[in-house]
Image: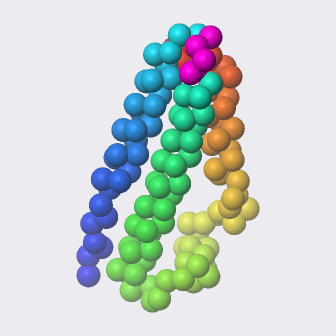
């Protein structure tokens, strides 16, 4: 049984909106009253896009595991199978920290590149 094709159009739309938000932020003059609000919009758009990408990746992995006849896939069995195959090294330790890590990286982008030229 071959894995189903996952529709990536929501992720493509989210990426396009993220790029558009970033362009709006970069187009604003320094000191503009809108610049901080657009910065917040870019960060929020990034967070949404990141979460969507993670959910789609999780869905792909679940469907591939089911297609490979690994049996019913729930959170516990997914982790056990991944641990047995060596695919989840460090995943348990970092759970819940990745979004904050990327959020901090996004904030750092704006802090180190205030004019958006980069």
Residue interval drawn in magenta: 31-35
Where does the image place residue 48, in percent across and percent down from the top left?
Answer: 52, 49
Give the quadrant of residue 67: bottom left
Q: In this view, does 63 lie to the left or right of 104?
A: left
Residue 75 visible? The answer is yes
Q: In this view, does 98 lie above or below 111?
A: below
57 and 42: which is toward the camera: 42
Above or below, 16 against 7 in this view is above
Magenta-highlighted stretch: main secondary structure? loop
Residue 114 in the image: x percent, y percent?
62, 16
- Farthest bottom residue? 71
Q: Which residue lies furthest to the right in this view?
A: 93
From this viewpoint, which residue is outermost toward the top? 30
The residue at 44%/85% (across/down) is 70
Closer to the camera, 86 or 101?
101
Q: Residue at x 60, y 76 (%)?
A: 79
Q: Is residue 114 magenta?
A: no
Say if residue 84 shows up in the picture: no
Q: Residue at x 60, y 34 (%)?
A: 40
Depth check, front residue: 67 or 20: 20
Q: Quadrant of residue 59?
A: bottom left
Q: Position of residue 53 (x, y in %)?
A: 46, 54
Query: Please, is residue 112 above or below residue 103 in the view?
Result: above
- The image's colour scheme reads rainbow
Viewport quadrant of the N terminus: bottom left
Whether residue 108 sits left or right of residue 30 in the image: it is right
Give residue 92's quadrant in the image. Answer: bottom right
With respect to residue 112, does 17 lie above or below? below
């Amino acid at each position: 049984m071959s894995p189903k094709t996952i529709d990536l159009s929501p992720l493509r739309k989210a990426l396009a909106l993220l790029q558009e938000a970033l362009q709006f932020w970069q187009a604003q003059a320094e000191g503009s009253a809108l610049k901080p609000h657009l910065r917040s919009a870019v960060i929020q758009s990034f967070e949404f896009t990141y979460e969507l990408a993670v959910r789609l990746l999780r869905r792909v992995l679940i469907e591939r595991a089911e297609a490979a006849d690994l049996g019913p896939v729930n959170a516990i069995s997914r982790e056990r199978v991944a641990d047995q195959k060596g695919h989840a090294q460090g995943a348990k330790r970092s759970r819940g920290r990745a979004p904050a890590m990327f959020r901090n990286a996004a904030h750092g982008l704006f802090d180190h590149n205030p004019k958006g030229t980069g």
